[in-house]
Amino acid sequence: MSLLGAAPSGGPDAAAPSGGPDAAADPRWSRAARLVDEGRCPAALPLLEALLEEAPDARVLAAQGRCQLRLREYPEAVVSLEAARAADPDLAGLDLPLAVARFHAGDLAGADEALRAAEAAQPDRPEVQLYRGLILLQRGEGATAASVLEGVRSADSDALNPIASYYEARAIGSTRDTEEAEAALQRVVEEHPDTPWAARAQEALDRMQGPRVRGWGWAGTGWEYDDNVTLRGAGVVLPSDISGQRDTRIVWNAGGGVEALLPRGFRVGGLVSYEGGKHRDLDDFDYHYPSFTGWLDRRVARDTIVRAQADLAYAWVDNKPFLGFQRYGGSLVRGWSRWGTSQAGAHWARYDYFFATEDVPDGPGRVGAACFEPDTVLCGPPGIDEEREHMRDGDELGLSLDHTLPLGFGDWALQGGYRYRHFNAPGTEYSHNAHEAILHLRGSLPLGLRLRVAGGYVYRPYRNASTFPKPTGLFFNRQYGLADDRRRDNDWRTEVALERDLGSHATLAARWLYRRNQSNVDVFDYERNILGVYLTVGVGD
């Protein structure tokens, strides 16, 4: 369904061309061209069709397509205009009407392609910029669309001004800037009275006086196969009470959110969610993970939003408290017209782990020497308190920069980003810096499918040498040694997800997640694959 639907009269039309293949040779073409110029398309179309039955001609096809466009026969107009382009690729003036016809026929990617060609020839033409704004609005880029449509309105075109003004207001409204959207709609009503666009604007104003709170919710379940539930490192022997590292599990999640639109460009919202997992065999790793996110947005300019956000979470593993997490941060979101959207942010986070490792008995100070007590399984270098050094609690400071770029065909978009994190733990084992790069590609495929491909790389240089022994250096009742080098991790991640809507409220998805953490400390050197299928049902916005 097109954004405009059945547009009110007075909407933008491409001008029909005068002249023809040979007006002197065939009076029917001369009369048909005159009728097209006068906008009398019902009378012109029979003449054009008769001419095309005798000999296809690019200019006749173009005139037929423009008439079909004027009569809002959008699919037929697309066929005629594309046939005209095929018959004569050099025929001028086809790009804009073809973009308009494709847009109203629901082919957003095709409309964008034709409009780019029209922009190259006439970048400042108001009709070109009008449809550029409508395509951006259709894609959900409200702030950028509003900026483009404001330019069309400011051009003071009598034919396009009420249309541009109305959709400028719609674009502002899509950004949740309620106060400015109301002002823009009121401007349409006052400046263009007794027009269909003023009537539409008044209807939108009436709707905006209603509730300004929206809510949504979802629930889902799925099945996963995980080939490394325990995150088993290279050469690490599992405890005797754990049968293996591979398992399947049933997962589930549920949640809901609410958001209120406030005056002066504010928006406040909250989201509560819960997810859990039950393993078939490794029930020591069953988990429950509730979380909460709250945010406050403030639009400071048409294409710029300032956001404050708080995240809280708590995790149980094997029905025992495992992790408490809190993060507070802010970000700046900026739209760049067709060049996409950028976001820069900073945060502080706190991790509290509710478990502790035991101190290892001190050895005599020589690797391979017998421990002091004959029944001691292992002993470590003297003077190291492993219980303290292995504490994972800590504070994190982070910075991030992301950019999402529409690719110009359909809803395909590419996102790239960089994150920096500085983590401090009480012990020496887990304090580190991290540099992360991400790249995500997403878009729609035929048959109603959507694809998401994501890749990421994290480099973690730890600030101290590890206090974990090498698995190959462990012998009963002997002191193990430690590596001299500081720990370095190269963490690679890949995710491929495919999903399809089942009706208006359900989604079926399949996902493959691969992680390879390459570490110079064997305990942390591991590989993991997760395969899953999921069904989610949602309600609300």
Image (spheres, rainbow, N blue to C red):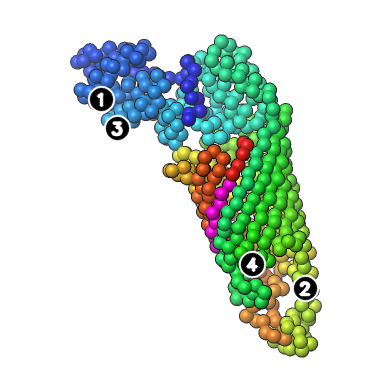
Q: Nearer the viewer, mark 3 or mark 4?
A: 4
At label 4, which amino acid type do we have?
Leu
Which residues make up the magenta segment? 529-536
Disc 1 packing (10 Å; few <14; some 14–19; many ≥20): some
Relative depth, front residue between 16 and 71? 71
Above or below, 257 against 467 in this view is: above
Location of mark 1 (residue): 57
Above or below, 222 against 301 in this view is: below
The label shown at residue 86 is: 3
Judged left or right of residue 476, residue 15 is: left
| Dot placed on the residue nearer the N-terminal end, 2 or 1 | 1
| Dot placed on the residue nearer the N-terminal end, 3 or 2 | 3
At label 3, which amino acid type do we have?
Ala
Q: Is residue 2 visible to us here? A: yes
Residue name at image x 37 percent, y 21 percent: 68
Location of mark 4 (residue): 282
Location of mark 2 (residue): 358
**SS for dot 3:** helix
Magenta region, main secondary structure: strand
**SS for dot 4:** loop
How many numbered discs sit on the rendered protein? 4
At label 2, which amino acid type do we have?
Glu
At label 1, which amino acid type do we have?
Asp
Disc 2 packing (10 Å; few <14; some 14–19; many ≥20): few
Residue name at image x 67 percent, y 70 percent: 486
Disc 3 packing (10 Å; few <14; some 14–19; many ≥20): few
Relative depth, front residue between 210 and 409? 210
Above or below, 315 against 105 in this view is: below
Alpha carbon distance from label 2 to label 1: 86 Å
Say if mark 3 contacts mark 2, CB within 8 Å. Answer: no
Q: Which of marks 3 and 2 is in front?
A: 2
